[in-house]
Amino acid sequence: MEKVTLGERLRYAFDNFMARGTIALIGGLALASAAVIVIVSIVVAVATGGEYGLGDLLWMALLRTLDSGTMGGDQGPLLFLAGMLAVTFGGIFVISALIGVINNGIEGKLDELRKGRSRVIEAGHTVILGWSQQIFTVISELVQANANRPRACIVVLAPKDKVVMDDEIRDKVGSTGRTRIVCRTGDPMDQGDLALASLGTSRSIVILAPEDKDPDAEVIKAMLAITNDRGRRAEPYHIVAEIRDPRNLEVARMVGRDEVELVSVGELVSRIMAQTCRQSGLSVVYTELLDFGGDEIYFKAEPELVGRTFGEALLAYEDSAVLGLRPRDGGPLLDPPMETRIGEGDELIVIAEDDDTIRLSGGDVAVHADAIVEHRPLSPAPERTLILGWNWRAPSIITELDRYVPAGSEVMVVADHPDGEAELARGCAGVRNQSIGFRLGDTSDRRTLDALEVETYDHMIVLCYSDTLDPQRADARTLITLLHLRDIAARLGHDFSIVSEMLDIRNRALAEVTRADDFIVSDRLVSLMLAQVSENKHLNAVFADIFDPEGAEIYLKPAGDYVRLGEPIDFYTVVEAARRRGEVALGYRLKADAEDAAKGYGVAVNPDKSRGVIFAPDDRIVVLAES
């Protein structure tokens, strides 16, 4: 073994000392300064034969070390002056280095703070893990939900520069009112980084799927890091996570167990598109229920209604709409049988402007029974649906649509996707009520659209090419297709019902120029649902029931099937008309305002029940029903 020299040992020790950081450097330089002061003071005191006291020399040496100009007026023996000069030179080098180290240490600490690596000291806050374009909608909704909380806080932990996150949130969210936004840089899958967000004191945790090729794997790893942390809190977490591929739901449930509420993005968007393509205006209803800007869904215990039936509760509120019941020992029931009794501890599921606005009307309701029309059920006719464009959700949408359309229906898919026919054959093997056709073509080409005879279809869906194009190019192609369709409609004098999928919420304003009936901004709807469930975990079961074709769903049915048209009718009468059919009336849509964004495209959810409204032949009643 090669012999180690003394110089190498000293150099190695010096390197280790320098690596200890700013505090060690400050301490070392301070000791060096003190050593210079003490040694010079002792030498001068001894050499001058005690002419100067040691204490005086130490004080004078310290002052000259800190300020080189202090020795300008010194007088005395040459040895004294030489000693003070030596101390001054030592101060110039050592103290200057000390100041430099302190300055660098402060700058380094500021850089560290800017990087967002300090632990958050908060309680009752919402934590968002991960980063995607959805985060801006989630934060905006949580800010509205926190409007009545005096010290609300949202903590964002993502593998992104803190300053960049702060700037983007400030630009795209704007004012956050009372809610403070705290960003930290870290990996949601790293338990050490998760500690920065103080999960143990949080109120809820939202896990966003990253924008990469395998987002579900990242979400599941983050769930594992939270639930299996040795230092985790004893009580269960309230975690909300999105899963893109339905095939990963089972694994995610095994990981999250009872602590995680999962939002299945693929199933959710497919079901919403399948439902909204058949009912113009339904997407506006869903958006109204999911966002915090208008009316939301709440749970309310009403001791005064205990013992009464669910049907009676429907007319018990003036400015709130009852849509279901949550029994004390069970899950939510939407549109239960009207004779269901409300028990002790049961909660009503209510649509209201805010939880403190849910108040019983307290008086008898006068229903205009003579305005209610007799229900005449009609046999549904087969439907034809045209799907233009392609992404991975196309087979799922067709499968969901098959649960609603009558037998003998047809669906035609036209897309610039060579493998589309094979993927439809694999993904739609269980379809029973529809025949499926596929045609290869450019959906933004006018000649392709003219050849389809689009006026012969009952419903149209325009899908974005999100699998192969970036969001802006995909939305641009959707917009071109919509413009062609509206021009065809104007030329033929035929009014189309079109549902279009948008990736970027900013492009919705552009799409309104095309006068499409409905817009499904996929990520926005998912973001709204994540925000709602993060505030109340029980809402996940309610939304799952609403969007599940096996339970009660929301429909827009002709107003003339419920009440007389052309005369003032209060909404109490509409609620009673729906109640007699075992349905729950939630609102209405006026065709005259269907293109007016300022009036919610004609949709009114949870209107005041005593306010009169006049329905026209094309108007619709928004109801919660089994079919």
Image (cartoon, rainbow, N blue to C red):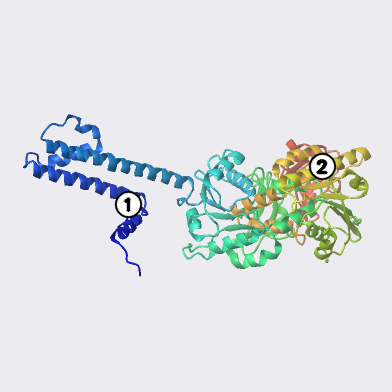
Q: Amino acid at mark 1?
A: Ala
Tag 2 secondary structure = helix
Q: Earlier in the sequence, mark 2 or mark 1?
A: 1
Q: Which mark is residue 312?
A: none
Residue at the far bottom in the pictured view: 1
Observer-nearest of 63 and 481: 63
> Residue 157: image x %, image y %?
54, 52
Q: Residues within 10 Å of mark 2 (few under 14, many from 20)?
A: some
Residue 366 visible in the snapshot: no
> Residue 37: image x %, image y %?
19, 44
Q: Which mark is residue 24?
A: 1
Tag 1 secondary structure = helix
Mark 2 lies on residue: 480
Residue at the far front in the pictured view: 2
Between the C-alphas of marks 2 and 1, the distance is: 65 Å
71 relative to 456, above or below = above
Observer-nearest of 305 and 295: 295
Q: Is residue 453 left or right of residue 120?
A: right
Q: Amino acid at mark 2?
A: Ile
Where is residue 102, by image quadrant? top left
> Residue 548: image x %, image y %?
74, 59
The residue shown at (62%, 40%) is 172
Q: Residues within 10 Å of mark 1 (few under 14, many from 20)?
A: few
Observer-nearest of 367 and 215: 215
The residue shown at (31%, 47%) is 26
- Which is more foreground, mark 2 or mark 1? 1
Q: Is residue 187 left or right of residue 440?
A: left
Asked if disc 2 and disc 1 are in contact, CB closer than 8 Å, the reply is no
- Quarter of the image for the C terminus: give it: bottom right
Q: Is residue 155 left or right of residue 460?
A: left
> Residue 279: image x %, image y %?
82, 49
- Quarter of the image for the N terminus: give it: bottom left
